[in-house]
Amino acid sequence: MKGPSRSGDAWHMPVQFFFTQRAHIPTMAADLELSPAQCHVLHLIEPGKAVAMGYLAEQLACDASNVTGLVDRLESRGLVRRRASERDRRIKVLQLTPAGLRARDMLVERMSAPPEIFDRLSPRERQMLVRILSRLLG
Amino acid sequence: MKGPSRSGDAWHMPVQFFFTQRAHIPTMAADLELSPAQCHVLHLIEPGKAVAMGYLAEQLACDASNVTGLVDRLESRGLVRRRASERDRRIKVLQLTPAGLRARDMLVERMSAPPEIFDRLSPRERQMLVRILSRLLG
DNA sequence: TATTGTTATACTCTATAACTATA
DNA sequence: TATAGTTATAGAGTATAACAATA
């Protein structure tokens, strides 16, 4: 593919980037003995914070029943802890266990620097990438 | 989250970007009556080109048996065509049908400009994004 | 004998619908 | 009555192992 000339081509590049990244996930996840969906859940639970099941369903854009199964498996492996909220006992809140935090750290580490291609960016390009992606993420 | 100060933080932004994009896929795919995996396959089959099943397994980083099922479902919906290669009849090659091409075009269109946030980038930032992602993709 | 793709099997992911507990 | 999460069920995604056809 030639260098894009029309400004519209810029829109296609994130698509390419997404699918390329997506292809890396199964192998990376398998190394951590996780599924891609479980990786996504771990990433959504920020260290030291408690999040509700419903929040995960919202962020994953999936049905709540799905979250139940995902959390079942993560909990059975000791990566997250599930307990009823004190304010509203219908709500179940989740927290990373120490093992879950380690898994999440490895995950971000692996995904952050998967191939060496990042080294090919200059410091200025890295800075620019952060700025642009920040704006794309709102 | 504050703006990143250490250079290492730059690595986290693509991770954040990936999972944010991943969360958009199920809804977008459902609108096209496709699964995320089927979207990935369609994206890998470039218009007018024939690709082998094995190539897809390689690009998806998944087992070949998996590709059989994915292609079965895409073929049964008339989005791809599967035939034996003439040079080596062990190899099955795939091509988009006209319907498959339309689906792929809609897919890229939807993923390329999902939210209006792209408008917030200056022309120079867009250009920079293309250049940086091009290098990240090799 | 080696390679490409398929089939058989088992588990995970996912949505829909019905259900339980709490509000 | 409404909401948060679970359970039951079914279809799709995924890996492993055994297999068929071709080379």
Image (tube, coloured by chain):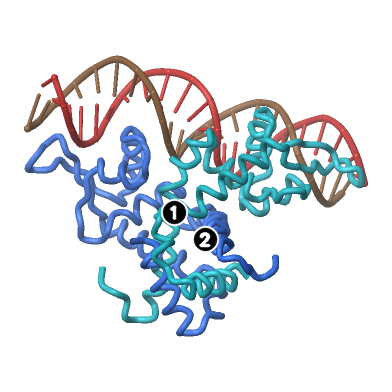
Chain colours: A blue, B cyan, C brown, D red
Which quadrant of the figure has residue A120? bottom right
In the image, what residue type sits under mark 2?
Answer: Pro
Residue plotted at (68% across, 44% down): B64
Let me know if marks 2 and 1 both belong to one chain: no
Residue plotted at (88% across, 41% down): B89
Residue plotted at (25% across, 41% down): A54
Residue B7 visible somewhere in the drawing? yes
Residues at discs 2 and 1 in contact (Cβ within 8 Å): yes
Instruction: Name the residue that disc number 2 marks.
Output: A14
Q: Residues within 10 Å of mark 1 (few under 14, many from 20)?
A: some
Instruction: Name the residue that disc number 1 marks.
Output: B21
Identify the residue at the far bottom of this view. Answer: A123
Residue plotted at (33% across, 62% down): A102
Picture layout, residue B119 above or below residue A81: below
Count the marks: how many? 2
In the image, what residue type sits under mark 1?
Answer: Gln
* Chain of the residue under label 2: A
Q: Secondary structure at mark 1?
A: helix
Left or right: residue A15 versus residue C19 is: right
The C terminus of chain B, quarter of image:
bottom right
* Chain of the residue under label 1: B
Task: Name the spot of residue A131 as percent of width and height, x first.
Answer: 39, 73
Task: Name the spot of residue B25 as percent of width and height, x first.
Answer: 47, 46
Q: CA distance from mark 2 to mark 1?
A: 9 Å
Left or right: residue A78 versus residue B60 is: left
